[in-house]
Amino acid sequence: MIAFVLNGQAVTIETDPLRRLLDVLREDFGLTGTKEGCGEGECGACAVLLDGQLVNSCLMPVGLVAGREVLTIEGYRETPRYRAVAEAFAAEGAVQCGICTPGMIMATEALLARNPNPSDADIREGLSGNLCRCTGYNMIVRAVARAAEKGRGLWW
Amino acid sequence: MVVTAYRPATLAEALRIRAAERAIPMAGGTDLMVKHRRHAGLAPKFERPILFLGHLDELRYVRRHEEGELPGLEIGAATTLTDLLMAAETPAALRQAIAEMAAPAIRNAATLAGNVCNASPAGDTLPALYCFDAQVVLARSGGERRLDIARFIRGPGQTDLGDDELVRAVVLPLVPFDRMLYRKVGTRRANALSKLSFLGLARLDGDIVRDMRCAFGAVAPTVVRCRALEARCINLPRQALAAQRADLLAGYAELIVPIRDQRSSAEYRRAVALRLLSQFLSDL
Amino acid sequence: MSISQPVPRQDAAGKSSGATPYVADMKLEGMLYARTLRADRPRARILGIDIPPLPEGYVIVDRRDVPGRNRMKLIFDDWPFLAEEVVNHVGEPILLLVGPDRETLDGLLAQIVVHYEDLPAILTLEAADYAPRHSEHSEGSHTTPPRHSERSEESRGQAAYPPPIYGADNCFARYELVKGDPEAIFAQASSAGQGIRILEGTYTTGYQEHVYIEPQGFVGLVEEGGKVTVYGSLQCPYYVKKALVELLACSPERVRVVQTTTGGAFGGKEEYPSILAGHVALAALKTGRPVQLILDRQEDIEASTKRHPGVFRYRTAFDDGGNILAMDIDIKLNGGAYAGLSSVVLQRAMFAATGVYRVDHVRVRGAVLATNTVPTGAFRGFGAPQAFFAIEMHMEHLARELGREPLEFKMAHALRQGDATITEGRMWHPVRLPEMVVRLDELSGYRRKRQALGQGRPPAGSLRGVGASLFFHGCGFTGDGEQNLIKARARLAKRADGKVEILIANVDMGQGPQTTLRKVVAERLGIPLDDVVYDNPDTDRVADSGPTVASRTAMIVGRLLERAAMEMEARWGESEAFEVVVDYRQPDFVRWDQHRLKGDAYPTYAWGANVVEVEVDPLTFEVTVVGAWGVYDVGVPLDEQIVRGQLEGGLVQGLGYATIEVMTLKDGRIEQNSLTDYIIPSAKDVPPMATDLVLNPYEDGPFGAKGAGELPLVGAAPALAAAVQHALGLAVHDIPVTPEYLLRISEAAKQHEVRG
């Protein structure tokens, strides 16, 4: 039995501890907002927060998550911080095909939670593990900067 | 149900399981989960059960200690790369290598010990660990032993880890240096495997070279470091280094035996490794 | 309000929150999974397949399960859904294993043993180049009848040549264009004292993988009543439908194709989805249950289509005055194992072979050859990125020979309105290159940097350079495609609920038509944007407005919708609910002869100019892009922000193509078959970019819009390569410009100097 906190709720699951957290989220909990883009930890589409830290759920065996807190896009989207990020992404044209977007948003939260006033280089570093093929990134970077700027009361 | 993974509550319990099951140690999983990945939607498959270690807080620490003449850092086996970036005591050479590794999500889970045990010829932390004469602390239920990293890593993916042993910590003597050149040449600026890497470290006392160490990554089955060649620079005035350069380059050229693979060519790896060495020497 | 004014994208919220489902998120009651057994040899006869005993609920699907034709209908008839006697590339699908548990499927798959007899494989473009057996007059045609693939009398003696993969000469398509009398000029050139100089150059371009972040996939099911429905990540619902109709030998009403929100495509989901749709359809029919097939990333890289690699040979006659007298161009593209759309890619490459320049006498010969490697296919630009790399580098090299500044030299030869195109059509519309170049220089400082930077210039130890490129992209399907193949139809429905619905087959794959085309309709009808509906297309409901390719969606289909909206507006009061149907009509000024490849290959062109600035590390030869700028003419942008998203995204994708996207094959197998090894730009690899637009309304585009999707990728690689040339003082002929390549050419140049 593996017990952890998922999007603020205590949950338990009986399953092979080596199953990828990605699959457990998507299949056992029906949380399909976390995506599989590569299965090798390169694209970041599967990124979630584990105890507030960004991790690639395709590389995280669910057994290692016991006793910890997992936050997916479904949990995050209920928060005011999410609203600020989503508004900024929409305003800056940072969403095209959308498949990278939930992961990018989780990476954005992980960044701003630690560094509420990031420089352009800091933002690129924070997003360096999230691949996007549509936008060329600069519109996403501007969106993150915009969210940070408008983030009074949220991250600062 | 077949046990695919164990989750020990303590190091002691982990050691017992390791010995009893020859279970495969997994700290962050970022190498093992990729190496053993299967088709989308499937859990990875291993020949033996996995032994989770990443959750053991008793293995997650960076402790400074004064040991003999040199202070050192003891880095617990579950210490992540991010932990090391956040620790003030992490020496610049190791910090820079880690900062250029992978990306935040990987660094948050991956461990230094894991990078060592993976023993990839391209392991990013290895050149620094070799230059600092790091040691690996190997624990078993009966006791512990220490091994120099250059003895612990035997070849690509091969270490001296016994079937009943676990890496408990990596010990890093805090050797002082005041000159450093670190270059990782990757396939891209971030989140890239290394085509080759070079670390050159030196300490000068006025104009005299008191210590000089260099290591090359990804240009041979294991990290290339040669004390005999380094010794030729020790206690030389730096102006005398120019005269040594040709011999040093020739000496390292023999040791640098890169391969061609999907990332780069042998000629490129060799040529650039030597250029970086040359640059380091002329900068001194 | 100007149409160009950005509006919020309606799809952003669902995508950001993770609520919008993609095909891998679908889970249907009783759904089974499919796994594909793929060839691991480049060319082999299948002697037999050992299948382990299958548990209850698990089935094999192979070519024997095909009720109709086992050929993916596209242009040629050579591409099987499932292998027959011979496999022709690593990754070719042989059979499917279908069942409820993926772990079990994986285990069964591992137990299957295929007995192969290896056949001599054709693994490189050089090896694929069989001299034509007969004196062929190249005929321009979309359908070259497949010739029979037995060896001819002549070749039987040549045991060294493997049998051709396609036709008698291993060539999917071969064309020749001649404009003016180049032969006469080259003949003149060979007599001394004519003042005619010759420059030759060979330029090569590599593979490129799309790396849409969403891997390909489908779900197929059989409805009550026997209709087959497939849901998938795709660009062309009707291509898929037509392919299924032939595969299943059924009538069109028995097949339904529904696009799921598509996580990137870039041309990679133009052809290959038809194969996958066929697979799930067969699996669903055999099992009677819904079946999901999602490609693993490695599988997707190894098996799905890639950009055609190419070799371009130029021979140019010119004079000291810098006049270009004639060009002779030979193009060879690597088509992989099956033809797919290769014949059209070749045509587009040929029509781009003299770039934006006036060349009065030119011969272009092109051939796309078959190899036992992954089939190549559509990828943003579709032959143009390859051709523009070649012509732009050739012009750079000509400029160098003449001691002229390259951009100034290029502009001196640039086409103007009214000039003849390479196919002797006309540039009917204004060509804004001069003002684009002025604006580009303002943004980038190109001229100043061209003087200040460059090889050997201070500051010492840094190698910086700038390069520029000029390019166009023909909008709409090449040649007579719109007129004779696609024949697009759009439907616009006024609904009783007060909404107006767009019923077209084009998909939103990130590039925003679900916003831009709704704007067109809303503006023309004078109704709020929110009242216009445009859902993911379902072939049961929408007209066949053609594929989402060739930069045609905004210009061609958008124009159909604009006409429909205007008609609807005029008829608005007529009824509470009615439909307007509009069919494509080719603009009157277009004249095109598909057989001779003469006339207007495209009704109009979008134009671009790029500058890229680089810094090359003198120790490692790593290239850092320090800045990238582009000025473009896409007619009128239907939404400035959406268009900017295309401009920046395309530019970055082109920079990747030029530098870090390396794909090499060893024994027919892709070496970089994971995202760890096939590298695309990350956020840290992207320089500051600035783009701008020049307005140039096109009378047959909605609100004056032209195509914009592919153009921004086309010019990036040559601008980068030109910048590297400037930085290093070395000629670049090949992309990707990797550090390994730069080391090699730099060493070669040194050897050359030493030898004197």
Image: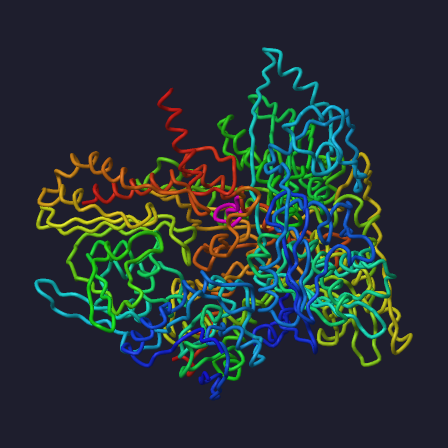
Considering every residue shown, the one lying at the far top of the view is: C192
Q: Is residue B170 magenta?
A: no
Considering every residue shown, the one lying at the far bottom of the view is: A10
Residue C389, by quadrant, is top right
- Count the labels in the image: 0
Considering every residue shown, the one lying at the far right of the view is: C574
The x and y percentages for residue C76 are 77, 45
The x and y percentages for residue B212 are 16, 48
Q: Nearer the viewer, residue A145 or B109?
A: B109
Vertical arrangement, residue C459 with respect to residue C507, above or below: above
Q: Which residues are magenta?
A: C656-664
Q: Is residue C263 left or right of residue A75?
A: right
Residue C511, by quadrant, is bottom right
Vertical arrangement, residue B201 with respect to residue A42, above or below: above
Magenta-colored segment: predominant secondary structure: loop
Vertical arrangement, residue B7 with respect to residue C187, above or below: below
Q: Is residue C661 magenta?
A: yes
Q: Is residue C475 left or right of residue C414?
A: right
- Write the residue at 45% across / 60% down: B35
Q: Nearer the viewer, residue C276 or C284?
A: C284
The x and y percentages for residue A26 are 56, 76
Q: Is residue A147 left or right of residue C15?
A: left
User: Tell me, what colour scheme is on the image?
Assistant: rainbow
The x and y percentages for residue C256 are 80, 66
Q: Is residue C391 visible from the viewing direction of this image?
A: no
Q: Quadrant of the N terminus of chain C?
A: bottom right
Q: Is residue B257 visible from the viewing direction of this image?
A: yes
Q: Nearer the viewer, residue B269 or C720?
A: B269
Q: Quadrant of the C terminus of chain C?
A: top left
